[in-house]
Image (tube, rainbow, N blue to C red):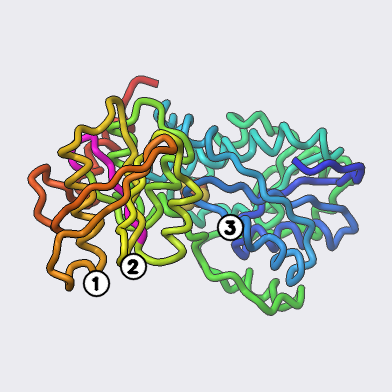
Amino acid sequence: MTKTNQKYDAVALFSAGLDSLLAAKVIMAQGLSVKCLHFTSPFFGKPDKVAHWRDIYGLDIEAVDIGDAYVKMMLAGPKYGFGKYFNPCVDCKIIMLSHARRMMEHYGAKFIITGEVIGQRPMSQRRDAMNSVRNESETKDILLRPLCAKRLDPTPMEESGLVDRERLHGIGGRGRNDQLAMAKEFGITEIPTPGGGCLLTEPASARRYGPVFEHIDNPSANDFHLANSGRQLWAGTHWLSMGRNEASNNALTRLARKDDLLFDVQDFPGPLGLGRQIGDDWPDSAVAEAAALVASYSPKAVKSAEPVIVIVTHKGAQRTVTVEPSRTPSMGWAETTWNDSKPTRNRMDTQDR
Ligand code: SF4
């Protein structure tokens, strides 16, 4: 949390989607000050874009990392269950609002706003789900939803005159026309695209999370950041990540922990490999197979048609292994599909709460 002496009237959940942007603007148009909180985790949030959004939208935004708390919530089994993939949308809103509530005092805020629109999303924006979110996050008297407020009972903020109910809105349903008209009125020219890019709702990303939940007793946010990075191969509890390009190689370097194994092909350009050991140290045979796999993604190493040397770094010490580049090792390394991850999601969805 940034140090601040500045006080605000409200804090806002700011996903950077159009609705959350408009909700902040509607309240600011009443002369009230708003601190926008952009929550981040391995699954959502773009902290590197906050400065750009501040500039183009004229909002006071802070990125807040809730990754580890979020992973714990998932592990405990979300009370309101998962959506189609690994998205626990109702519990997600609850955890964000609870967090915002705890941050209010720091910002001197009197209430919280969200960009929720009743009926817009099947899981988390039905009236009953919105009531559960409000009650479970203990924000009953301090939560204002400016875009659909006129479809809801007046809040204490409206009753006290702090917020003018007449200047709030009564939007409902899945259309975007009302929001686009409002964006025009506010002079917003860079309109965010619908859908916040939450990786938990995308099968191509969600498929990466099943084995992490399945094989690691207490996974951390770092584990899921790793699962997002580059190519992911699993052989039982052996987990190998490989960069696909410079960005994912850099991500692996950043995420590496001391007890990880790092694989780097000597003399040829190629991906960085990161073996995350779950439980016991890998046997030499697994290290050699992983080295052969990493080498197989170096086209020049493969083209050399010679055994290649792979440097393996572990706990600060280096050794070399000489391998034939190979994608057909015996341990059965493979990328997981959503169908592989689904049973884990279903088990977590029904575990005792
Ligand atoms: S889509 Fe993702 S970020 Fe949005 S409410 Fe659902 S889980 Fe949370």
Q: Which residue occupies 74% across, 36% down? A: 103
Disc 3 C-beta below 8 A from ligand 1: no
The residue most toward the top is 352
The segment highlighted magenta reads 235-243
Q: Which residue is mark 3?
A: 46
Q: Nearer the viewer, residue 151 or 163?
A: 163
How much space separates mark 1 and mark 2, taking CA atoms? Answer: 7 Å
Q: Which residue is mark 1?
A: 300
Mark 3 or 2: in front is: 2
- Which numbered disc covers residue 269? 2
Q: Residues within 10 Å of mark 1 (few under 14, many from 20)?
A: some
Is the distance from the Cβ of mark 1 to the nearest ligand 1 atom less than 8 Å?
A: no
Badge 1 marks a residue whose secondary structure is helix
Q: Exactly how many numbered labels are in the figure? A: 3
State which tag comes first along the sequence, 1 or 3. 3
Residue 137, numbered circle? none
